[in-house]
Amino acid sequence: MRVIARRNIAHYRGELKDILSLILQRRIKEGPYIKQFEEQFSKYIGTKYAIAVASGRLGLFLVLDALSLNKNDEVMLPAYTDESVSEVIQSLGLAPIFIDIERDTHNIDANFIEGKINSRTKVILATHIFGRPCNLAKITEIAKKHSLVVIEDCAHAIGAEYNGRRVGSFGRAAYFSFGITKPFNTFGGGMITTNDQVLYAQIKKKSAHFDYPAPAAILKKVLISYGLFLLTSPPFFLMIVFPWLLFLSFFDKDLINIYNKTVKPAVKSGVSGVKYTNMQALMGIRQLSNIDTENESRRRNAGLLMSLIEGKIDTLKDRETLRPTYYFFVVLTQDTSGLAKKLLRKGIDTGKHIMRDCSAIDGKESDCVSASEAVRVSLQIPNYPRLKQEDMRYIAGILTRECKKTGTGTR
């Protein structure tokens, strides 16, 4: 039996050597790599400017803050997203307006946007969920018609393309996330991209007043990242993590939920005003040269998996003009918990309930039918560069067999 973790933590060869070198040079916090990384990143995305920040959430906060919106102005966003996004919006005194999603892509459904626009509507947050670009053509058309600002949420989508252009270059601004569990890992952090010189200058001015994080805080993130890297590597995962996953599955508990409540808050920068560091920037420069190769590996894995399970199991759909990054590969099933347990017993670790129907937070009744369904039927299947074709064939075989036996391969 193969044992396959749902995620793998991204590190590159020579990373520890780079970190040690910067420690010896006393250039962990400040140094030339920050500006170099910003310049290379903006060139990669195809924008004039890029600003390195301490987290993706802080990136969204700074962009919204720089727009000088009034209290209770409205920001439209997909209902199916991470609840931290709406928390950032509300922290600025703005009102999140949740839009239902497309049933087949789980991205914001542009057909529902115009019906909710009013005089207080100012921003559309275009999220590229799981690395799948949303319908930018229609969203930017609506925004232009109603004089709205488009901000792209590219937290899952570095390197994804829409009609031959990389996402992050379409809106007034965009933000990316480089969290520890993301495919592009710089021990936390993120990036803002924009072509707007005024917006760039405002954000640069504000972030210049932030302090660098304490050395202990930087070291803590490095240690947690490498700890997770070891725990998700095949031998440690098999001996330590997998038995716990099996045990907890009998009680419908999940290690990721435990991680989110305990470890994650320790590495989550949120919207706290700290700077991105020179060390993180060097990590980013090194990974930027390899991210396209890694994305191609994910596309290749996803393509093989789709070809093997097509017609047997429902999956999210892709438009022909898109090049997703498949941060998660999602299958759709009537019984996510049951299928997850069956796959786990065959060595395949999966994820569910990664996103929420945020229109139903605080006990509110959701009017977003597809977002509510997405929470119930989505199961995230392992897909990362370290997995080989035989791994994907094994996953496809188990998926097909289990869904055929139980009849749960559709939603």
Image: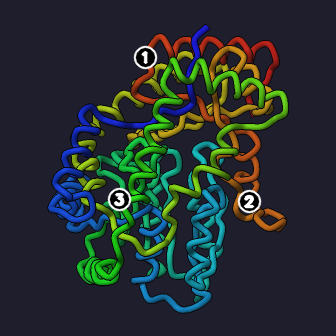
Quadrant where the N terminus lies? top right
Bin the neighbour count of mark 1 within 10 Å (Cα to Cα): few under 14, some 14-19, many 20 and up: some
Which of the 4 quarters of the picture holds residue 303?
top left
Determine contact: label 1, label 3, CB under 8 Å.
Answer: no
Residue marked by disc 3: 168
Q: Nearer the viewer, mark 1 or mark 2?
A: 1
Which residue appears at 34% of the width and 61% of the height? Answer: 191
Which residue appears at 80% of the width and 68% of the height? Answer: 362
In the rendered view, does 164 fall on the left or right side of 26? Answer: right
Instruction: Say which amino acid is labelled 2.
Output: Cys
Nearer to us in this view, 8 or 297? 8
Tag 3 secondary structure: loop
- Distance, label 2 to label 3, CA atoms, is 26 Å
Q: Which of marks 3 and 2 precedes in the sequence?
A: 3
Instruction: Say which amino acid is labelled 1.
Output: Lys
Residue marked by disc 2: 368
Furthest-bottom residue in this view? 70
Determine contact: label 1, label 2, CB under 8 Å.
Answer: no
Counting from the top left corner in percent of width and height, residue 310 is at: 59, 21
Which residue appears at 63% of the width and 21% of the height? Answer: 348
- Distance, label 1 to label 3, CA atoms, is 30 Å
Instruction: Say which amino acid is labelled 3.
Output: Gly
Q: Is residue 138 above or below residue 232?
A: below
Residue marked by disc 1: 388
Q: Nearer the viewer, mark 1 or mark 3?
A: 1
Q: Is residue 308 above or below residue 31?
A: above
